[in-house]
Amino acid sequence: MSSYELMRKLTETEGLPGFEDRIYNVMDQEIKNHTNDLVHDHLGSITGKVGNGASKVLLAGHLDEVGFIVSQITEKGFLKIKPLGGWWPHVMLAQRVKVLTDSGDLTGVIGAKPPHLLETDERKKVLDIDDMFIDIGATSREEAKSYGVNVGNPVATICPFEPLPNEKMLLARTWDNRAGCYVALKVLERLKSAQLPNTLYAGATVQEEVGLRGAQTLAETILPDIAFATDVGVATDTPGINKGKAGDIQLGKGPILGFLDRSMIPHRKLRDFVVNTAEQKDIPYQIELMTGGATDGGRLHLAGSGVPTMVVSVPSRYIHSHVSVIHEDDIENAVELLCAVIQSLDEETVNGMKGL
């Protein structure tokens, strides 16, 4: 399978928090292409295991994506929704969605009271999600239910994978965080036949978007010595962003090394080791200090007696919306950097990173 085919398969497959079945099955099959030694937790997080070194290294993206859940079916057949993960309501209106039911997938569109009927002060406000609905073309609650719709159905975004005219710029609906899943799979592919000085567990967690839940259970299952969370970071290279406040993160300038987020400060020895490896291997990287978000690293590093953890991300535009854009070089350089780091983590090096 080519890189683009794998990217398309990962990004176009649905997997909402708590409903990761479809993308789990994809990840399960892709991991089995590289190893038959799989390690799971009880919630659905999944890894492939390669190597037999004394130290355990965990590398994980997250399977889930932001989306919605049906909370009510109105008398006229419209679907009210609650968010799964963080949404800014501005990006939601008039977008096509897919309602996943046991009877099949249904296309709908997110609607609200039209602007022509809004008062002047209403137009200036961000519309609340509770004031939105999904229109699937049903004319009654009974008709909607006859299509298989029930309260509790997950709702996914719609957007196909597509290289833009600059073919290194890749558009898809779920780079957050199928980019991290892709990185984990490619690292597993590259290192499955290597003489690793450690044991690598590479895969993905569940329910990151609703509280980093699978990261906690997976880390407690494996109890790694070192952990890496692979995710996406917020690119700041579009118009209107104050880089003095947001930092300077650009597509095509390398993967992001997280030096700070709301849930974790990386272990300094591991952080410096990753930076030094990138510089020695001439792999470009960018540094992010973010106080407004969190990643799986926030739970991975708290497992057991504590796990030195680093977040390696791919810059992305427009995350937590129906579409996002990344640069192919960034995702491939993330793979290159993590492969180099993991191959250098022998037992002595790992033991030297424990404690201050």
Image: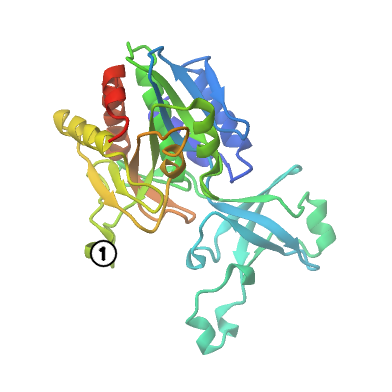
Residue 145 to residue 312: above or below: below
Q: Quadrant of residue 285?
A: top left
Kindly identify the amino acid type of the residue bearing the numbered disc 1. Answer: Lys
The residue lying at 33 percent from left, 37 percent from top is: 331
Residue 301 to residue 72: above or below: above
Is 301 left or right of 248, judged from the image as shown? right
Residue 213 locus on image (x, y percent): 55, 43
The residue pinned by badge 1 equals 245
Residue 52 to residue 238: above or below: above
Question: Which of the two residues, 128 or 207, is positioned nearer the viewer here?
Answer: 207
Residue 305 locus on image (x, y percent): 43, 33
Residue 63 locus on image (x, y percent): 52, 38
Question: Which of the two residues, 291 or 48, is positioned nearer the viewer here?
Answer: 291
Looking at the rendering, in which quadrant would you find the N terminus? top left
Residue 347 locus on image (x, y percent): 31, 18
Residue 297 to residue 25: above or below: below
The residue lying at 47 percent from left, 19 percent from top is: 49
The residue lying at 34 percent from left, 42 percent from top is: 313
